[in-house]
Image (cartoon, helix red, strand yellow):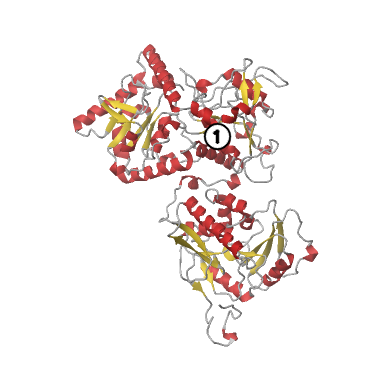
Amino acid sequence: MNLLESICAHRKYRNAVVSAVIVAAVMVALWLCAVLLGAGLTSGGPDARLSLEAASNWEELVVGRSGGHDLTPTPIRQDCHYYNCFNVYRCGRNGNQRLSVYVYPLARYVDEERVAIKPMSREFYEVLDTIINSEYHTASPEEACVLVPPIDTLNENSLRRDKIGQALAMLPYWAEGENHLLFNMLPGTPPQFDTSLGVARGKAMVAGGGYSTLTYRRGYDISIPVYNPAHQSEPVGRKLVHDRRFRVVSSQVNIHRDYREDLEAQVEQAKIAGTTDDLLVLGKCGHDTNLTQRCRGDQRYQYPEVLREAKFCLVVRGGRLGQSALYDVMRAGCVPVVVADGYQMPFSEVIDWREAAVQVYEEDLSEVVHILKREVSEERLAEMQQQVLWLYEQYFSTVREITLTTLKILNDRVFPAHARPLNLWNTRPRPAAVQNPLFLPLTAPASEGFTAVILTYDRLESLFQVIQMMAQVPSLSKVLVVWNNQKKPPPQASLWPKISVPLKVVQTRENKLSNRFYPYEEIETECILAIDDDINMMTADELEFGYQVWREFPDRIVGFPSRNVLWSNDSHSWKYDSEWTNEVSMVLTGLAFYHKYWSYVYTTQLPGDIKSWVDTNMNCEDIAMNFLVSNLTGKAPIKVTPRKKFKCGECTSGDLSANEAHMVERSQCVRHFSRVFGTMPLKTVEFRADPVLFMDNFPKKLKLYDDMGSL
């Protein structure tokens, strides 16, 4: 529904003179074009060229000459949804349960007169650059689940639609747009301002910034925000709501005059009531086209600074449903009040906007101040402001974050078994409010005891010794060997040790440390013992006692080798410490018991890029697991009884320089993980679990666990 239709649909505006409304809509369209040109979402601005200096070296493709290509634009399929237009069988071909995205080679698309049909904007270049440098990128179109054309469709104001449709049809893997993804922030052209990209695009999905509920293909398209590059030098507004001057601010210059009259009427009511700070309505400063100025009579306000003085900020329907005003409001830390019927909010597939915004019907705009006073308490407002800032920084702040969020949503659609739960999309970190997910078991395990998971590469001799040692532990239920060597197959069954419990071997597809924590279906116990393939000096009593301690503390990591993190006053950062002290904040998973739930969380919900960091650097998976568990439980791990002659995995053949390099790498992991988590979740304690009569001089027959190591 366009602006004219939406206005006429309301009862109070049906008697308005249509010609006057049309004139107003045209004026709005012209002003919006000026705003967009000033905002930088244009094709030929100098900033865009600075970001694209290599464009002169791109291949030039002439649109209009067949060259063996079908130049017939593919009509839009409005009936598309995930099950009739998306080919899911293209996905997962690379063996990973992760989206694979192919970006066509960058090229200059020109018409027969060698005029570019759409020069690439800086923002679209950032979109492509983000995809290419992300974990989702693939260089092989045959392995690609999703394909992204190198044709800039962000701003429909400057598109030559016929040529764009032909250019898309020229793509070698186009196939009527199947599994292709287009990006569009500014759909439609004056005076209609359609709410979706009007280019002939066949079955292609669109990540668009102006969808209405009528044009949005739910579960197929993705609604994204309208990014505004104009005010990126401005600071993010972090002033608390109770320190802000105005209750409600309207700063848009492109809203319809009837909406503005509703707001002005409320301003007059506020004057009569003596509450002039309840509502501030701003507009253009005469004929001044300066986009950083807003005026109220003779008073001038700097934009967007004025938003940082507001508790609520109005985002009212303009020429387009999608407004860059929403982006500005969120950056200012102001709670948005969205007055645009039918607007499909950005990333609404995963974001719960009830926690961060107030949505008001257009016909209720005349009562908006009263509604906000009545419906939103000061405590609720403070919570919403924090949520707005967190959502902005997580998903909206840059073109990179917008692009990555789009890909994550697509990834969750294609691989729902690995999808991030909706509560995690919307839950900001609260270090002081820990929720322990393991305080109460929900179902009985399929098997009692524990499963020993041994990560190995090719050290067969020590591996077999570990298996034989493990077989002596009474509570052992199964041994699962994770064979992490793709070049060499595991030994044949006849060569493995003969033990009294099942022994399973899983060969991985890639050599990754995170394979240790994958929730393999072969694991039927609640408890997992992660053990390295060279830890062969343990006794059955020690391991059995460790398991019994875990049974009392099933939500914690329980194990033998302990470490700590320290704050360095010299570098003002955290560092990894391997000295044997009484303080413990980590138990290394080279030999540790933990609940199988943590394997699921590590594999599917580890925040940020920590999992890829671990697999790329082939280090620190044990630190990552400790961060994860402590962050979710708010508890420290438990160290079990000291070991004499316990193997030091960090003592590399007496090579001091190698050991120092290892410590530096581990410290880098600690610092990076703390940045991703936004806090240092590890808890430092002075505690160790020992069996009864451990160090007492009593006969062995009186001790339940006699064969225990000591310092």
Q: Residue at x 58, y 59 (%)?
A: 661
Please provide percent x and percent y for residue 467: 70, 68
Could you classify mark 1 by the number of other residues whose Cα lies within 10 Å: few (under 14), some (14-19), or many (20 or more)? Answer: many
Q: Is residue 551 visible?
A: yes
Indicate the quadrant where residue 536 lies: bottom right
Work out whether 294 lies above or below 669. Answer: above
- Single out the residue that lies furthest toward the front: 657
Please provide percent x and percent y for residue 92: 67, 42
| Amino acid beneath label 1 | Val
The residue beneath circle 1 is: 127
The front one of 562 and 573 is 573
Work out whether 615 lies above or below 133. Answer: below
Q: Residue at x 21, y 30 (%)?
A: 271
Q: Is residue 113 left or right of residue 314?
A: right
Indicate the quadrant where residue 285 lies: top left
Indicate the quadrant where residue 545 lies: bottom right
Q: Is residue 170 left or right of residue 225?
A: right
